[in-house]
Amino acid sequence: MSGFLQILIGGLLQGGVFAVLALGYSLVFRVTNVVNLSQGAFSVLGAMGMYYFAAIFGWPTLPAALAAVACATLFSLLVGLISFVPAVLRLPNSSTLVLTAGLLTFFVGVTLVVWGNQPYALAPFSGNEPLVVGSLRIPTQGLWLAGVSAAIIWGLWLLLHKTMLGCALRACADNPTAARLMGINLPRMMLLSFGLAALIGSASGILVAPLMSLQFDSGQFFTISGFIAVAIGGIGSFAGSVAGGLLLGTAEQFAAFYVSSLFASTLALLLLIVVLIVRPTGLFPSGPQRRSDVREDPRVHRKLIRLSARREVTLAIVLVALFAVLPALPLPPGVLSTLVIAFILFIAVLGLDVLMGYAGQVSLGQAGFMAVGGYAAGILCTSYGWSPLLGTLAALGISVACALCLALATERLRGLYLALATLAFGLLIDSLAGNLVDLTGGPSGLVGIPAFALFGFEFSSPVQMYYLVLAFAVVLVGALEGAMRSGFGRALKAVRTDQLAAAALGVNVGRVKIAAVCISAALASLSGSLYAFNFHFLSPEMVSTGRSFEMIAMLVLGGEGTLIGSMFGSIFITMLPTLMQDLAVLKTAAEGALLVFTFLIMPEGLFGRLVLVLNRFAPQKPTIVPVGASQ
Amino acid sequence: MTSIALEGIRLSKNFGGLNAIENVSFAVRAGSLSALIGPNGAGKTTLFNMVTNVFPASSGEIWFFGKNLARLAPHQIAVSGLIRTFQSARVFPGMTALENVIAGAYIHLRSNILSQMLWSARSRREERRLVAKAEALLDMVGLAAFRDVAATELPMGGQKLLEIMRALMAKPRMLLLDEPAAGLNDSETAELAALLVAIRDSGVTILVVEHNMSLVMGIADDVIVMDAGTIMTSGAPSEIQRDPRVIEAYIGGKSGVTHA
């Protein structure tokens, strides 16, 4: 019995952290309708501040904590002011969701710069002696955590329901336009909610830091745990956030004790996926559901940026010729191997473009399919002696089957919830790859994967691999371009912008989306297999959720809905560490910042910018004739 | 006796206790240009949404050329030949005017995704044929010059016409047009009237929701009048114009005058 109680206490303590994280999500969602994936990073920022004020400067606990919260909140407010608020005002929700993933990457990168990759632990506020009640041992830090969490929850409830400011915050969520007409300063309210979320996030980070060691990428862990908690409880609902957090914490502790500590997070993700499928709005849905049959706001609509048909052909020939002769040029060492990686990732990003750029469905789990492709091919070729080609094809089949299951299970889900389901899928694959040690080699990776071979020819040198992936890229871009400029591509674009109008023309919206999901998974799988064959090795972090976010950055930077654009993005981001060799530690932060700023100042991407430049040199034949100025 | 294109039998729709449509029965003759009129809130657009199963009817049956539409999804209804447009023109942003019209041919595409990916001769031939057909349709309504313009950059009247051309590209047996003249000026309205008559004469049945009485009375073969979720009356335009209940609903009876 006392064992049970001990686990329950542990679960509630952990759940308290999740609950506060979940509250941060709900708070921002209530005001902006955006799931802020950078939520977990606030906790690490807070803990990092605490480390400096308490451990380095030697301040007493309370002033150090207050100073740390203040610094973390101010920094977050600054970041929110220049990125988050303009994004919510200008971009469609799906882009803002992706932008917050970029913010998370940015914050993780900043932590990496400051802290390096060492783990840090803070001293408990009231010493290491646990409080002993009968046979139960309760760490005193847990009491601090429970007390402050309860105070935060109560304070937020008072703020939102008992003050004029809270009323204004809630109005912004329910009807932003009407709220503005009533004189509410919408941008200020958005910034306020972002700042409040940073405040409670950093406070929870300071409280939890003595209980677990933190390092630069703990922000991802917090984001994911808080996200699972809030998705189970119901996004936007405060009661749901608290319940979801406590439920998740206790469920994980019990699973760790009674099943296996390795699978605690896997089970939590399965719980999340079941909740998303059965009850997508969570256990405690908040208020009336928004209409989902209305189109996204007109701010989604962008200008058409296209090349004329002849220039498209010319550009294609120039690019193919350039890449074909590249290995013959005197290149610095390593460039070719880096390009191989870039092209392998490009194949996966192409799939992401079909799904996100054309069909408009946000996927945060593309690396999950890469993992399925890489591990399935790797295992079949090492343990079962299959040929690489057969292994790749079998892996492709498995990935498409997974994608089909995911797509069918989540068919009712739209927009936000679909994105969340793909994130859950990616995380589930992450945790399976790390935990199924007998099958995948666990965190230390799967070794001894052979080189890719076709009909007896082995692609073992970088040059051979380079031409192989280049050939794949050319064929795939050609094939997808053919589909995208014909009926299938039009159906995808129609579904992206107006599902109701698409259905009224006979487009089976569900089926078209499922097709896009499967194509995207197939390409990711192929990319994952090639990745494994290229390195002769595969470890979970090579195809983790961080990779999913990185591929989104590649897509957005290159230009969504252009196919070839993502090649520019893939090459640029893969080359980034090589370009700034001495500053390689900045890579993660730079990647996050790039994603965020591409969305804000160059939504057409690198390729779109290139097209704009090229079109400037053809004033006699503009692709877009302004209304009324045509012949 | 002419056949019936679209028939609704005792249709009702309630939204959480509010009866938007109550026990409505109507029939549209095949080959006719029929109009559905009525004051705001009479339930005209709701009726369209029920017919195309955007919101399923709470009760009643809908028959389209002898086919029961009740269990069909919106896209299956389109496949059966009933194509609708929307009250606010819903052209696809991110596509040119030409691509928007071609998008209407979706249900008639014969090349599948695989042959599109392989750039097969058949799929390229089909694309060229669709482009030619869409260009002809754009030309018909004077939008040929805007073929490569982003559809959302067209003026409202152009978008409305584009939406009708997109619907025609689907080779419908019947068109449901929701307020095609809203937002058009007088000369555009006259062009629209001629266009609708031409479409009717080509053998396509049309049911049009419209507020513009002169347009309706000038071109409609039959008129159905709705008020407060029920059918008030239906018949030839000349009969409708003389019906005292219609005059009261539109021009205003005793109660109407005091409120005006």
Image (cartoon, coloured by chain):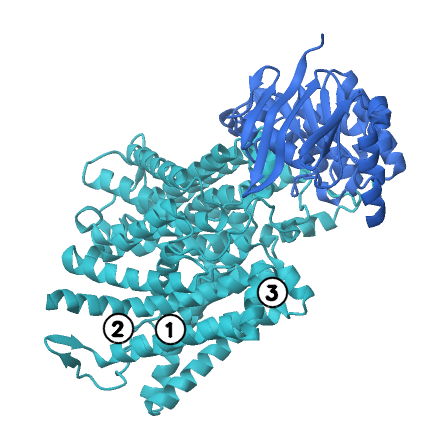
- Rounded to the nearest angstrom, the CA distance separating label 1 from label 2 is 12 Å
| Nearer the observer, B105 or A29 | A29
Say which mark, if any, is on residue A212.
2
Q: Quadrant of residue B252?
A: top right
Helix, strand or loop for disc 1? helix
Task: Tell me the subunit letter for badge 1.
Answer: A
Disc marking residue A86:
3
Q: Mark 1 = which residue?
A: A44
Q: Amino acid at mark 3?
A: Pro
Mark earlier in primary sequence (1, 3): 1
Dot 2 amino acid type? Met
In the rendered image, residue B223, in percent from the top left (x then y), is placed at 77, 25
Residue A59 rendering spot, x and y as whole percentages:
35, 92
Q: CA distance from mark 3 to mark 2?
A: 35 Å
User: Which residue is drawn at the image coordinates 29% and 60% (left, top)?
Assistant: A248
Quadrant of image for the N terminus of chain B: top right
Picture quadrant where residue A314 is located: top right
Looking at the rendered structure, the secondary structure element under dot 2 is: loop
**Crowd around label 1: few <14 · some 14–19 · many ≥20 (10 Å):** many
Can residue A365 be seen by looking at this rendering? no
> Could you tell me which secondary element the residue under label 3 belongs to?
helix
Label whose residue precedes the other's in the sequence (3 or 2): 3
* Chain letter, blue in picture: B
Evaluate if marks 3 and 2 touch, with contact meaning CB atoms under 8 Å apart.
no
